[in-house]
Amino acid sequence: MDKEYRYKLAKKGKNICPQCGKRTFVSYIDTKTRIPLPEKYGKCDRLDKCNYHLNPYKDGYGWILTDEWKEQRRQETLNRNYRIPPKLKVSHINTQTVQRSLTKYQGNTLIQYLCKVCGTERVIQAVKRYKIGTTKQGGTIFWQIDDKNNVHAGKIITYNADGHRNHDIPPNWVHKALKLDSYNLEQCLFGLHLLPDNTTAAIGIVEAEKTAFIASIYLPSFLWLACGGLQNISGQIQRAASILKGRKIVLFPDLKAADKWKAKAQELKNTYSLDISVSEYLEKQATESEKEKGLDIADYLLGVKPPQAEPSQIEPVQPIKKTKAVNNTKDKETSAKDLKQHKSRILAQQTETDFTEDWSTEISELETFFKNTTLPQTLRLNDCTFIIDVLLFIDNHFQTVKANNGNITFIPYLERLQVARDYIK
């Protein structure tokens, strides 16, 4: 039988955390008097970046209980009817509400900031993919839509003009803003609705929805999802296990959180038989100052402007085991011309040999080359494309060209494999 504790975490309300100074602190309360305990007792919701948690029972404060209270709780326990409550039906938000939010982006501070950094066309394409909404006050709505297009929730976050969160305005949920009574929230992975339309791409999972959105602009060869916090990922993976099984999944933790995410990845791998791993790239590349700040992959990506890069030319990142020193300091002007030259050659082959109908010979030759070659860890194809995981890059591209053999739309995938082969040679 579970122990009955007098002091428990409050179910509502958040205060300033004594460690990180953010309004993410849940205080312990006395269940008998409903009075909060001293300010130091509580738990910060920022598990990865703060992780403050002082349990009143840890230092002995919680064991100062009266015999009268203990007897009262014992009697309540004996008299309790232990019927298992029925499982509540999961609530969903109607699609009309989502549709009405897909407007007024000129007043959405996050979208306006990203348009300046990444280019309007790329941002709007990502907005349409992820169905990013806008509140009347200019906040950003990250809709959680599952693989069957059920809308589980809408998380509202307000940003400043520089793209950073406005911590004066706490996050909110659409169902709370709309005052939907008895709403039974069951979260799903942000971006889950994209999986049925893309069955081959590797899946990248990050913590924040904003990070997934930005990463999708810079690294489109991954299909990016967000869990909203490490504490959510187990339940979200469990509910999506059937559609995730058989897919390559890479977790991209914030700095200082890699060990926790590795443990969680191993747990999920063992429980649901998933092909899941954790990227250590940020941990290996970051300075001590960056680690202390707890930066994520989006903080790095926003430091690289992609105005001259076609979206299909930017590749995903993740460390690999194979290593080889390679000189990638080719002249930028030469490297920028290579993709154009390869594209011209392929288009010429289309006309002369009906290349668009069958790429089997080219695919076979490329496979033979890469299987018999020691691959570098990283590779720069051109001024806009730097590959940090060559092995994953090659694997993703072969899946795409094989699944779309002969389709002219997917020629860039074939040509990038050929450029990579020529550089490695």
Image (cartoon, rainbow, N blue to C red):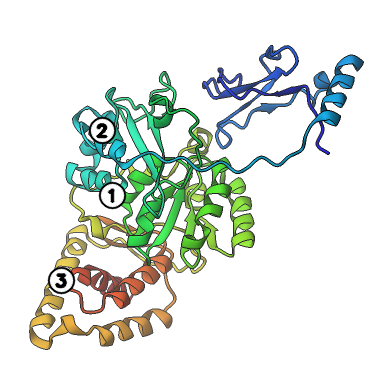
Q: Residues within 10 Å of mark 3 (few under 14, many from 20)?
A: some
Q: Is residue 383 visible?
A: no
Q: Image point 37% across, 65% down: which residue?
A: 199
In the image, residue 73 above or below residue 194: above
Residue contact between numbered discs 2 and 3, judged by CB atoms under 8 Å: no
Q: Tell me the amino acid under the disc marked 3.
A: Lys
Front residue (pair 184, 195)? 184
Report which quarter residue 29 is drawn in. top right
In the displayed structure, does residue 94 sit left or right of residue 49?
A: left
In the displayed structure, does residue 79 sit left or right of residue 316?
A: right
Front residue (pair 129, 81)? 81
Q: Nearer the viewer, mark 2 or mark 1?
A: 1
On the rendered image, what quadrant is the N terminus found in? top right
In the rendering, which numbered label is found on residue 343?
A: 3
The mark nearer the N terminus, 1 or 3, is 1
In the displayed structure, does residue 168 sit left or right of residue 255?
A: left
Q: Give the CA separation, mark 1 to mark 3.
A: 28 Å
In the displayed structure, does residue 119 sit left or right of residue 24?
A: left
Front residue (pair 87, 27)? 87
